[in-house]
Image (spheres, rainbow, N blue to C red):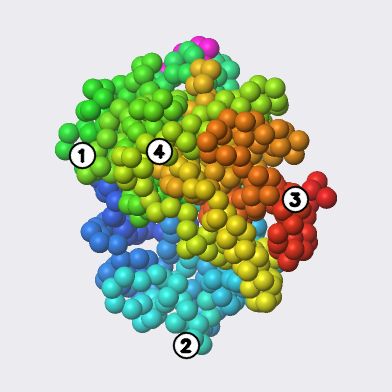
């Protein structure tokens, strides 16, 4: 939920006008719970103030501060003085929940039961296996299949569980597993007529608002999370502005007529201009927005970058270097990526910039700003560097907008797209030639070039993250595929080395005005020109027609000059190599909930890979294995 969670802890985020924590207290009060112990760690101030304002309302709340994370198990050991000798509830503070507790109470009361856990049979990752009402495994080897469930973050626990909680940091699951080994039962309960959703991510947070509204209208479980006051607020706004889907607006919100809102949550004091277009947006407290807001969360920079608040040093320094006032700057995070870099759009009036924060887990992340300056000095189209602070691991770049070559292709503008590809190839030939000579002359700092070790990493990455999980081949088949890909890499290694972009796909070409710009070139290095060409022309994001691919390859070769042409043979081998790396990345990223959207490119990637294997005829064993995964559209 960054950047929103930097200043507002998740339990205090509003769910239909009330903090999530308030809804949880209401649930416990309906169950007759009189005493609650609230464990605090991140940004406890707002939670303490909320508890203070509740006064004598039930449940009465005891606060425990946890300076260092102890895990759910470690927290229980710390709170043992509070728990006593009766069963107690544990509930996560970032879920939307509405259920009858009786099924859990009955399950926990049976002899030998150490805990009763609320499970969901359909939603979530479904990693828990249950047999005859008993949890058999917490980490399934077949998640999401028949007989697997998701733990909902609510459990009724026997006090004897403390005997299995180890000292220091631990998960409560560790104690449950120890209880199972000791012969106790950990019950799993799917509660009928209930509602649950994890709302710890922007997608889940918005989904909960949408579903709760629908359930309120039909009086289904979960509908009571939208109370009369929130319903009246929604009705009042619907009379004044046009809303698609839902609008959950806090106090002192101002929305000018003409604004278009679809599935939006506006926190207290948010201001929306008449030209604003918000689609699936979360606008933070006191934030003012206008124009199109394409991301899931927007926060005012004021609270994040105010003096004395250490929550976001990079943001505060970036605003200082830009000379933009925090109180009037909106912070709009991009979706998570797979490169240990975090992108945030900063918007002050009609000015925009991109704040890039990075870690040095990957050496190349620290090279981006220097590469941008180098490429710009040669006249190549890249974003300008507005600020650079390597000591604090951030840079601020020119904002080129959101319109990419990928988006252009998805719109079906084929003639315009072909023109853009040719323009990109003209710049790419200069990159491969002029920039390569300049980089050698200047001894530009780069990551190591393509090498046998790098090619080996790419093919092993493909086998580990894609081939094994998707195909489950025999060990002999894996060995054969690795040998085939090694032979293709040997041929690429013999090609002349130029300066390559390394990740040249349509999403990394942004269209600003009439000119295409390159981004994401931090991995720039020396290698075969064919790798860049294959990345661009055999890109699963757009799936160019084969005749257009061949036409664009000929176009590049006519402009290659002293570099010499890239043969069709080498090009298709490079396509096999690049697509193996891409499919491995889609497999790894697709398995992560934060980056699961990359999984939708697996099928296009397979189609492109089958084309490359057919044209290169280099990897017959791999082609045979992938044929089993062929989709009807690709046959």
Could you tell me which quadrant the N terminus lies in?
A: top left
Which is in the foreground here, disc 4 or disc 1?
A: 4
Return the residue nearer the eye: 413 or 196: 413
Choose the circle earlier in sequence order: 3 or 1. Answer: 1
Residue at the location (67% across, 77% down)? 476
Residue found at the far front of this picture: 562
Q: Say if the magenta span includes residue 153.
A: no
Residue at the location (35% across, 66% down)? 71
Which is in the foreground here, disc 4 or disc 2?
A: 4
Return the residue nearer the eye: 122 or 189: 122
Q: Position of residue 351 (x, y in %)?
A: 36, 19
Rendered position, 130 above or below 150: below
Return the residue nearer the eye: 556 or 67: 556
Region in magenta: 254-259
Q: CA distance from mark 2 to mark 1?
A: 48 Å
Q: CA distance from mark 4 to mark 1?
A: 47 Å
Q: Position of residue 517 (x, y in %)?
A: 48, 28
- For disc 1, the marked residue is 309
Q: Are marks 2 and 1 in contact (CB under 8 Å)?
A: no
Q: Is residue 266 left or right of residue 125?
A: left
SS type, badge 2: loop
Q: CA distance from mark 4 to mark 2?
A: 69 Å
């Amino acid at each position: 939920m960054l950047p929103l969670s930097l200043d507002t802890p998740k339990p205090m985020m509003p769910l239909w006008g009330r903090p999530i924590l308030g809804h949880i207290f209401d649930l416990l009060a309906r169950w007759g719970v009189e005493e609650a112990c609230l464990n605090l760690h991140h940004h406890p101030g707002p939670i303490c103030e909320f508890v203070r304002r509740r006064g004598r309302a039930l449940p009465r709340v005891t606060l425990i501060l946890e300076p260092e994370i102890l895990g759910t198990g470690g927290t229980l050991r710390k709170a043992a003085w509070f728990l006593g000798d009766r069963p107690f509830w544990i509930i996560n503070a970032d879920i939307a929940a509405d259920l009858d507790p009786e099924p859990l109470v009955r399950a926990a009361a049976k002899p030998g039961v150490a805990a009763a856990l609320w499970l969901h049979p359909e939603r979530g990752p479904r990693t828990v296996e249950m047999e005859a009402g008993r949890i058999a495994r917490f980490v399934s080897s077949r998640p999401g299949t028949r007989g697997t469930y998701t733990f909902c973050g609510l459990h009724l626990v026997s006090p004897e569980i403390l005997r299995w909680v180890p000292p220091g940091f631990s998960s409560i699951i560790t104690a449950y597993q120890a209880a199972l080994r000791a012969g106790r039962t950990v019950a799993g309960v799917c509660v009928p007529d209930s509602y649950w959703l994890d709302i710890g991510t922007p997608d889940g947070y918005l989904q909960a608002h949408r579903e709760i509204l629908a359930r309120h209208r039909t009086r289904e479980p979960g509908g009571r999370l939208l109370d009369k006051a929130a319903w009246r607020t929604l009705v009042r706004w619907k009379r004044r502005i046009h809303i698609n889907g839902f609008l959950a607006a806090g106090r002192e919100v101002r929305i000018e007529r003409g604004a278009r809102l679809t599935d939006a949550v506006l926190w207290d004091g948010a201001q929306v201009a008449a030209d604003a277009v918000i689609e699936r947006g979360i606008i933070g407290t006191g934030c003012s927005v206008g124009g199109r807001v394409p991301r899931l969360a927007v926060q005012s920079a004021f609270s994040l970058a105010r003096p004395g608040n250490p929550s976001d040093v990079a943001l505060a320094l970036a605003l200082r270097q830009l000379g933009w006032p925090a109180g009037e700057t909106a912070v709009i995070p991009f979706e998570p990526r797979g490169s240990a870099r975090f992108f945030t759009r900063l918007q002050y009036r009609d000015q925009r910039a991109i704040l890039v924060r990075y870690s040095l887990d990957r050496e190349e992340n620290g090279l981006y700003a220097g590469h941008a300056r180098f490429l710009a000095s040669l006249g190549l189209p890249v974003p300008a560097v507005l600020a650079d602070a390597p000591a604090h691991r951030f840079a601020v770049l020119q904002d080129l907008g959101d319109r990419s070559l990928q988006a252009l292709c998805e719109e079906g503008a084929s003639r315009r797209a072909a023109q853009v590809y040719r323009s990109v190839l003209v710049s790419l030939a200069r990159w491969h030639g002029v920039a390569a000579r300049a980089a050698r002359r200047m001894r530009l700092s780069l990551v190591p070039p393509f090498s046998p070790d790098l090619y080996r990493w790419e093919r092993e990455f493909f086998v580990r993250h894609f081939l094994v999980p998707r195909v489950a081949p025999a060990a002999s088949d894996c060995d054969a595929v690795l040998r085939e890909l090694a032979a293709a890499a040997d041929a690429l290694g013999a090609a002349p080395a130029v300066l390559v972009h390394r990740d040249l796909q349509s999403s990394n070409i942004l269209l600003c005005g009439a000119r295409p710009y390159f981004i994401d070139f931090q991995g720039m290095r020396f290698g075969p020109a064919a790798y860049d060409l294959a990345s661009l022309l055999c890109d699963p994001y757009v799936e160019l027609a084969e005749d257009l691919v061949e036409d664009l390859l000929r176009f590049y070769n006519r402009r290659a000059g002293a570099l010499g042409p890239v043969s069709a043979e080498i090009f298709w081998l490079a396509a096999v190599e690049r697509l193996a790396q891409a499919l491995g990345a889609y497999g790894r990223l697709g398995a992560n909930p934060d980056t699961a959207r990359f999984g939708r490119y697996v099928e296009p990637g397979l189609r492109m890979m089958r084309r490359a294997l057919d044209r290169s005829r280099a990897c017959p064993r791999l082609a045979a294995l992938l044929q089993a995964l062929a989709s009807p559209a690709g046959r």
